[in-house]
Every structure is written in C-alpha cells, then in structure tokens.
Amino acid sequence: MFRALILLALTCLLSPALADERAQTQQQLDATRQDIAELKKMLGQLQQEKSGVQKDLRSTETDIGKLEKQVEALQQELKKTEGELERLDHEKKKLQSARVEQQRLIAIQARSAYQNGREEYLKLLLNQQNPEKFARTLTYYDYLSQARLEQLRNFNETLRQLANVEQDISLQQAQLLTQQGTLDTQRQELEKVRAERQQVLAKLNTDVKARDQKLQAREQDQADLTRVLKTIEETLARQAREAEEARQKALLAAQEAEKQRQREALAASSDAPKKPRAIPGPLVSSSGETFGGAFSAARGKLPWPVNGRLLARFGETRGDDSRAKWDGVMISASPGSQVHAVHGGRVVFADWLRGAGLLVILDHGNGYLSLYGHNQSLLKSAGDVVKAGEAISTVGNSGGQDNSGLYFAIRQQGRPSDPAQWCRAQG
C-alpha cells in the first residue's frame, strides 16, 4: 500500500512537467505546420509561374527550331552560291588564258605585217610572172586575211564573255555578302533568345530547388516533432493507467483495512461464531490490439539515331527520386547534330511536348514506335513518310534540359523496350 501511494505521488508530480513539455511540443508542431502550409502555398504559386514559363518555353523553343531550320536552308543556299562562284572563277581563268593566247597570236601577226610593210601585197602582185603562182598567192592572202579577222572576232568575243563573267561574279559576291549578313543577324537573334531562355530556366530551377529543400526540411521537422509528440502522449497514457491502477489498489487496500477493523470490533463485542465473509476479488481489465522489313525482325540490327555517349541507360534511376526510372536512353551529342530514323516509318507526332521538348515519334507498324526528344529543330512534320537513316531532327536541349543530348526510346505495344537490345552494339 505504501509503495502504491509513493507511485501515485510521483505520478502526480511528473504529470504536470510532461504536460508542459507536451504543450510546448504541440506549439512547435503547430508553428511548423503553419510554416509548411505557407511554403506549400509559395510552391503552388511558383508552380503556376513555372507553368507559364513552360508555355513560353514551348513557344520559344518551337521558334528556335523553325529558325534553326531556316538557318540550315540558308547555309545550303550559301554553299550553292559558293559553288557557283567557284565555277565562274574557273571559267574566268580559262577565258583569261584564252585572251592571253589570242593576244600573243595577234601580236605576232601585227609584228609580221609591220616588218613587211604596207606595200607587200601590191609588190607581190606586180612582180608575179607566173599566172598560176599569182592565183595561189591571192588565195593564200585571202586565207591569211580571214584568219586574222577570225582571230580578232574571237578575241573580242572572249573579252565580252570575260566581262559578263566578271559581272556575274560581282553579283554573286554581293548576294553572298547579303546572305551572310542575314545569317549573322539570325544567329545573333537566336543566341539572344537562347540566352534569355537559359536565364529564365536557371532562375526558375534555382527557386524551385530552394523551395523544395526548405519544404523538405520543414516536413522533416514536422515528422520529428510528430514522433516526439507521439512518444509523450504514449508516456502520459501509460502513467495515467499506472496511476489509476495504483489508486484502485490503494482503494482496495483501504476497503480491506476497514473491513478487517470492523471484523475485529465485531469479534470483540460478540462471542457468537464468526460467519465467513466473502472477500471481493481483484479488479481485472482487458485491452486488445487489434504493392527495312518488319521492325520485329530488326532486333539487335538497328543503327543508333546519333553518334554519342550514353548518359543514361534504360531502367536506371532518373534523378534523385528512386521511384522514377528511365524508359529510354539519353545520348550526349553536339547541338545541331542530325538525328536519323533508325527504321523506316511514318511521323505520327512532331511538336513540343512538356517534359520532352521538341519531340518526333515514328510509327513502324505492328505496334512499334520510336521516340526522339529534346531536339533543337524538327525537320519532318506529322504525316511524313521517312526512310531508314533519313534526317528527322537536330540535337538540342529543349524541354528544360541543362545539356545537349537526345532522348531515344522504343515502345512495343505501348510498353517501353530497352533500345540497347534493338540497336547494334557500340564500339
């Protein structure tokens, strides 16, 4: 009985301290919950802002893709212009050589005519005695005169053609300078747009990361405080049960002492035989505790869509979340590198998609699809039929990627399939 009273007294003394600690912990928990609510609200606003930036990003990267396509077409025109300039320059050199040779022949003839003098033809006619020789001489001089005239005509024609070629060269050079100026302007505009997009993305990603880290820290604080509060509540409940048990034992002891006193008093006042009295039993309690050909034949024979190094393999963990896995591969490649179809098929999607950027999807029949994402520009449109090895896009980092690379995946009846099992071994 004395021990029960001591336990009851200690419980009465400790309970207020534990209650105070519980109240303080509850206040801290409430403050933490309020901080988490505010952080989630801020994250929600940030996600809305990110959604708006994603829309702008879609428009920007689509425009960049179109601009890259125009730049590529302009580069092809520049190559044609440079080729035409090379052809005209070669023709100019040939004409200049012909002109030099013609000048040399004309100079020889002019020198010969000067040395013989103007009266050569008249003297030759007057000194002729043989009529047949005279006729031959006339014919010879006629041929000679015609040859001289023909050489002069050829020389004049060469000069005319040379002047035309030089004029064409000047026009082509002027056109080339104009095209180069246009190309430089478009490139500067493209670099400016890229820089602006990268700044917006960098700031957005930094803000999201900071908010996420702060929210994770707060949620961890909440979890820790919740565990502490649970421990305190369990301790208080256990002490309450022990105090109640001690009180019941003390009450039973007091009742038993009172009954014993009454029996002794009754025995002292009466000699009558004692009747046995029923002694109540102890109290009981109960408690319960109550988861080229068929595509199917090309396994292990397909080429890779672009040359590069595998940054991520099929099935590997994607980012920091262990639950997210790669359903394709990421191939590192230089920006602007051409992406080639691994097999003939039809383009069923060619547009910007959130998370994949500028994306091309090819249908190869019988439920087989190949996907090419994060492109810089799209060279094909939905509905186009492409052959194996044909260029369909260029490598980029659209869709919010930090580095340039190609996302490549294969779907078989809607299920992801490891591209490494379909493409030829590298190296």
Image (spheres, rainbow, N blue to C red):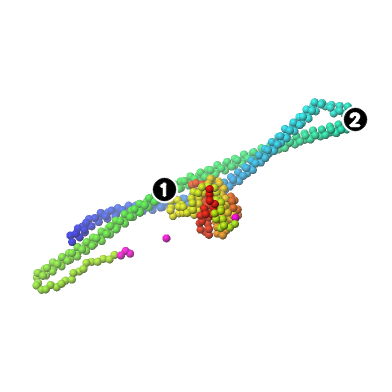
Residue 7 rendering spot, x and y as whole percentages: 21, 58
Q: State which region is magenta.
A: 288-292
Q: Residues within 10 Å of mark 2 (few under 14, many from 20)?
A: few
Residue at the disc numbered 2: 130
Task: Give me the residue at 83% from left, 34% from top.
Answer: 143
Q: Can residue 398 be seen by looking at this rendering?
A: no
Q: Residues within 10 Å of mark 1 (few under 14, many from 20)?
A: few
- The CA span between labels 2 and 1 is 117 Å
Residue 283 rendering spot, x and y as whole percentages: 23, 66
Q: For the residue labelled by badge 2, is the local secondary structure a helix, a strand or a loop?
A: loop
Q: Is residue 19 left or right of residue 380?
A: left
Considering the image in quadrants, where does the N terminus appear? bottom left
Q: For the residue labelled by badge 1, is the local secondary structure a helix, a strand or a loop?
A: helix
Q: Is residue 120 left or right of residue 210?
A: right
- Report if residue 392 lies within the magenta region: no
Near-viewer residue (77 or 422) = 422
**Amino acid type of the residue that numbered disc 1 sits on in the rendered structure:** Ala
Question: For the image shown, how many numbered marks are present on the structure?
Answer: 2
Camera-side mark, 2 or 1: 2
Task: Give me the residue at 55% from left, 55% from top.
Answer: 299
Near-viewer residue (127 or 37) = 127
Q: Is residue 282 above or below residue 318?
A: below
Residue 325 rendering spot, x and y as whole percentages: 46, 54
Residue 210's label in the rendered image is 1
Residue 25 rendering spot, x and y as whole percentages: 31, 53
**Amino acid type of the residue that numbered disc 2 sits on in the rendered structure:** Asn
Q: Is residue 340 left or right of residue 93?
A: left
Near-viewer residue (316 or 15) = 316
N-terminal label among 2 and 1 = 2
